[in-house]
Image (tube, coloured by chain):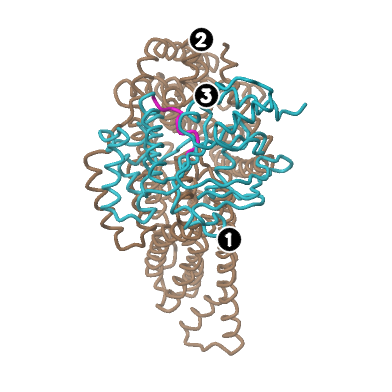
Chain colours: A brown, B cyan
Amino acid sequence: MTVAALLRPRGLAARNVARRHPRRIAVLTLAVAALWIACFAISIRMIRYFHTIGDFGPALTDRLLILIFGVFLGILVLSATIAALQTFYLASDVALLLAAPVGFRRLHHARFIETLVASSWMVVIFGLPVFLAYGWVYGARPLYYAGLVAVLGSFVVIPTALGVLAATALVLVFPARGARDTLAVSVGFLLAAAITMGRMLQPERLAHESGLMGFAGFLAGFGSRGSPYWPTTWAAETLVPLLGARDGEPGFNLALLTSTAAMLIAVSATVVERVYLKAWSKAQVGRVRAGETERPLGRWLAWLAAPLPRLARLLVVKDLTVFIRDASQWSQLLLLGAVVAIYVFNFRALPIDGDGALAQGMRDMATVLNLGLGAFVTIAVAVRFVFPMVSIEGRSWWILRTAPVSLQRIWRTKFWMGFAPLSVFAVCLVVLTNHMLSVPAVPAAIIAALLVALVAAIVAMGLAFGAVHPKLDTGNAAQIATGFGAMIYMAAALGLTFVVVALAAWPFARLLHAGRYALPLSATEASAVVACVTLAVAAIVVATVVARRHAIGALARLG
Amino acid sequence: MIVLERLRKTFGPLVAVDDLDFAIEAGTVFGFLGRNGAGKTTTIRMMMGLLEPTSGTVRLGGHDIATAPDAAKRVTGYLPDRPHLYDKLTGLEYLTFVGGLFDLRRREAKRRALALLDDMRLATQGGELVETFSHGMKQRLALAGAMMHRPRILVLDEPMVGLDPEGARELKARIAGLAADGVTIFLSTHSLAVAEEVCGRIGIIDRGRLVALGSLDDLRARARTAAGAESDGRTLEDVFLDILNAEAPA
């Protein structure tokens, strides 16, 4: 059996999905294209600025490239290790291949390519606009683009090989599931830390010349040239001369890169060939017993959930037990922490100090937008925790469905499991930030009340879209939250938020203005305020009711 | 105890189940036989309220599954052909959870769960995560779940798949014991030997239609007539094939 034949099932599966859901593919393509174009535009702006600095420019270009390749290398090694754990040691079809007359070396090559694609496609797609922007700004010749293909092709092989070797070593030492869970949590932590740090650096300052100068200063202080032993340096040293920015030895550096990649493939294949059966056998030994520390926790959960109605209690204890035992879901919490930190930081960073008219106006605008932003953060959380609620039941859905529990009760229980924590979360966020904005008590209370209603609709919509677009074959909430259904859920929930904020903006601005200057509202204005708020509430109620109906219908169709 | 009236299910132009109409008395072990794709699982899914019929009704213990689903499910236990369970729960936690769904108090649920785990030879694995269970162990655990609320009707879809010989023998004995206690068993199976051994009544479904219904002796007599065969010692397998061949389109 050839390597191509081993990869064929993946290709056929992708083709079949594309054929069955052409509209889904079209929407995803458009979304990726929009992001890609945005990356391209931002990259052009930044590189063009460096390009205009004069003699200092090429040095900055070098360092920026090394920095980009360095970041890519770090991300790729981590993601390749996780992907390799899955494709080499945890995938269900490995047993089928092991039973077939397929040599370990061929198996390695097929799984290596799968790992490479699974771990690198996103970095390559979103890295490509940066490198193309370099070519665009420097007016590079075709040789640069040919060199770029060769560099990227070789570069992604290196972290993939390192990832395969790391995964194999981890499996030989630890159980595969434990290693994957630990890595997933570590990646979640690193990602959350990176996002938070990225925000704290206030990237909006790059919109100003002074900010870009500061970033240039940072790059200038980023050491001299990279170490000659790192593939990041070889990649940058290949591309910079091809851009025409300065002289160099692109051929030599490309040779270093490709030969290292080839050598690492050979090492990876040899190691895997020798130890694969042993490592795979060890990977099959999962965690057997619920941990000693989990049993008292189970009792605590039962005690904490005791005041809830029977079905809610059962489902809450069951879902939390599963959550605690599934470390892959913990990374969600870390990302949630990052989102909250960024949200609060955004309000601290707003230029709204002082009593001037501009500062007052900014505060009023921020207060109104706070409703939308609070809803936006809640949607980001809901897509991770509410949208997967139906899918997470997975193939075990029959257990609930054949119990004497109506779909309406199941929906109601799931709704409250999402609504109760999310409304508390959203209200805390908005109350805290409104306090930072010194919003008077009455408008702050109205905003909080409207947000609670909006959260109800967001949760109802999450359940509806989750039931209409279930992913029953994966128990991984993170994967469920990245599918097509999650994307259109976010779009729909954001659409509703936009409508509500648009309807509520003028009444709130008017109320805040009237309160500040003690100007009473005219009868017409008061009527208009009431009408707008009523329409906003009506939009929320309609969305909730329609979502509930669709959710229950979809749950019934789930079987 | 189980009544199907003109039960029909279509998927577009495909008629999966075509006007099934029969009743099963209390305490009967009813064998539901048919080729792959004949409509057995579709029928069972409609019986359990997992699939909406195109037309017709199902009554379990006198309760219509469409209009009184909670009451119907309360008297029925179900074992699906592929019992997917909650992998991250332990066996004991799973059974206690299922008991709760059927309104058992926690203490009572735990007591029954421990007894059933013992019955199913899973007592030592009760504290282990379900994801570590073999297929046969999951099958036994799912069966224990179906029996947690002591149902008057048990619907078993291919319950022997994945069981070791000891487990299969125990299950057959259990089925006989439950029937003797008045529990009605609806047993879908590919194993004609099992049906022959434990079923008092048998229905054969072919391309969605019920083509034979009766005791094994009734079916033997019918097959004899249809095929012109003479021997009395025919197995259920012979009878099954005779009936299906007689029903096959020319």
Mark before the other along the chain sequence, 1 or 3: 3
Q: Mark 1 lies on which chain?
A: A
For marks 2 and 3, give the CA distance. Answer: 20 Å
Q: What element carries label 1?
A: helix
Q: What residue is disc 1 on? A: A549
Tell us which disc is closer to us: 2 or 3. 2
Residue type indicated by callout 2: Pro
Residue type indicated by callout 1: Arg
Residue type indicated by callout 3: Glu
Instruction: State the extent of the magenta-drawn residues as a range.
Output: B156-164
Asked if the residue at tag 1 contacts the one at tag 2, i.e. Cβ–Cβ closer than 8 Å, the answer is no
Q: Are marks 2 and 3 on the same chain?
A: yes
Taking the magenta stretch, the answer to whether it contains residue A177 is no
Q: What residue is disc 3 on? A: A114
Mark before the other along the chain sequence, 2 or 1: 2
Q: What element carries label 2?
A: loop
Q: What residue is disc 2 on? A: A101
